[in-house]
């Protein structure tokens, strides 16, 4: 399924065109994106089974892997080569490494001190106002000590640190996994307001679909390292029938599982046939010995 609009670079926030990613030591590309084009202000829900390529797509969009010139553009600039995107905070990527690697996240320091340091680093009143709004929304206690926080509390502080500075493109990989249902709902409502009021663009990868029916403007479905479905949410016939997003996604993922299983069976059959032909070829190379001669050795 393809988007029906024309991809205009000037109006697009994120464009991936023939982008690929291959892990060292492997020949097959783990990700190949033919065409994904998100306009400014879009909220794209990125979904797929484990290993489908969601995290790889986010890393490519964040400019963390080398791509041919023009394969990945963010805000009209090359995501890999233009370091200004991340240095100015216009492009923010929150992935697994971010969750584990934020400095001081496990140290004996107060949450309020960490957030205040982030605000001072930005040095604007906007950052001060945003930090206070985020702390109020996520119910972050400035007296929390990071060394004694739960995973959910620590994640709230990390989100405050990451969003203090206004961004234009936000890439999120399972950032709400440790949040309770109230904090998650409030955060998604905040992201929606950011996109509608400031024109911020977001790609959000998650396996939790409760309450997301009206949140995204676009959906991208990854399977086997490719984007199999990508369009505006109103273009999906399955959702027009009033079905819950969870059940629609469940059907898609089960279909993916069947395709993977069928593909594996085909590969196994081809491998067995290749081995059989190799054995037959090897036997033809050996000198011919009639079976009656073998009786002599019994």
Image (spheres, rainbow, N blue to C red):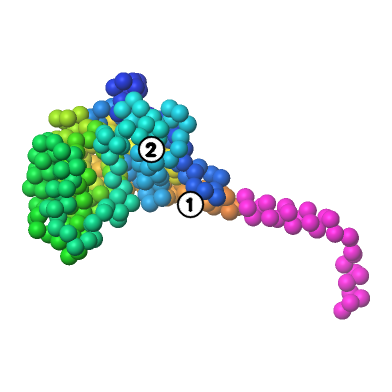
Residue, far bottom:
298
Q: Is residue 34 found left or right of 270 in the rendered image?
A: left
Quadrant of the rendering where the C terminus is positioned = bottom right
From the top left corner, tell me how far across and down residue 211 is, in percent.
18, 45
| Rendered residue at 13%/48% (across/down) | 116
| Mark seen at residue 261 | 1
C-beta proximity under 8 Å, tags 2 and 1 = no
Most foreground residue, 103 or 55: 103
Q: Is residue 108 found left or right of 25 in the rendered image?
A: left
From the top left corner, tell me how far across and down residue 107 is, in percent.
22, 61
| Mark seen at residue 63 | 2
Indicate yes or no whether the magenta region holds residue 280. Answer: yes
| Rendered residue at 33%/51% (across/down) | 97
Q: Disc 1 on helix, strand or loop?
A: helix
Tell me if mark 2 has few (under 14), some (14-19) or many (20+) residues whose alpha carbon lies within 10 angstroms of its own.
many
Magenta-drawn segment: 270-298
From the top left corner, tell me how far across and down residue 159 is, in percent.
20, 48
């Amino acid at each position: 399924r393809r988007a029906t609009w024309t991809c205009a670079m000037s109006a697009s926030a994120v464009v991936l065109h023939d982008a690929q990613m291959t892990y060292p030591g492997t020949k097959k590309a783990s990700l190949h994106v033919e065409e994904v084009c998100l306009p400014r202000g879009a909220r794209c829900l990125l979904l797929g089974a484990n290993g489908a390529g969601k995290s790889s797509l986010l890393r490519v969009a964040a400019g963390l892997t080398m791509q041919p010139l023009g394969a990945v553009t963010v805000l009209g600039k090359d995501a890999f080569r233009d370091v200004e995107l991340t240095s100015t905070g216009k492009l923010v990527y929150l992935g697994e490494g971010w969750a584990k690697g934020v400095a001081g996240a496990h140290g004996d320091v107060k949450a309020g001190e960490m957030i205040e340091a982030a605000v001072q680093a930005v040095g604007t009143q906007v950052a001060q106002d945003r930090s206070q709004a985020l702390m109020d929304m996520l119910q972050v206690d400035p007296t929390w000590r990071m060394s004694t926080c739960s995973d959910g509390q620590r994640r709230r502080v990390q989100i405050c640190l990451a969003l203090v500075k206004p961004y234009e493109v936000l890439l999120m990989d399972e950032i709400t996994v440790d949040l309770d249902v109230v904090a998650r709902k409030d955060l998604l409502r905040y992201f929606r307001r950011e996109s509608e009021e400031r024109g911020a663009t977001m790609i959000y990868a998650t396996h939790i679909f409760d309450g997301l029916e009206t949140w995204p403007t676009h959906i991208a479905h990854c399977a086997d390292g490719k984007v199999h479905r990508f369009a505006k949410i109103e273009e999906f016939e399955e959702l027009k029938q009033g079905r819950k997003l969870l059940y629609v996604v469940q059907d898609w993922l089960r279909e993916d599982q069947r395709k993977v299983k069928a593909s594996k069976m085909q590969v196994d059959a081809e491998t067995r046939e290749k081995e059989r032909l190799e054995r037959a070829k090897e036997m033809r190379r050996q000198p011919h010995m009639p079976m009656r001669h073998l009786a002599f050795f019994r």
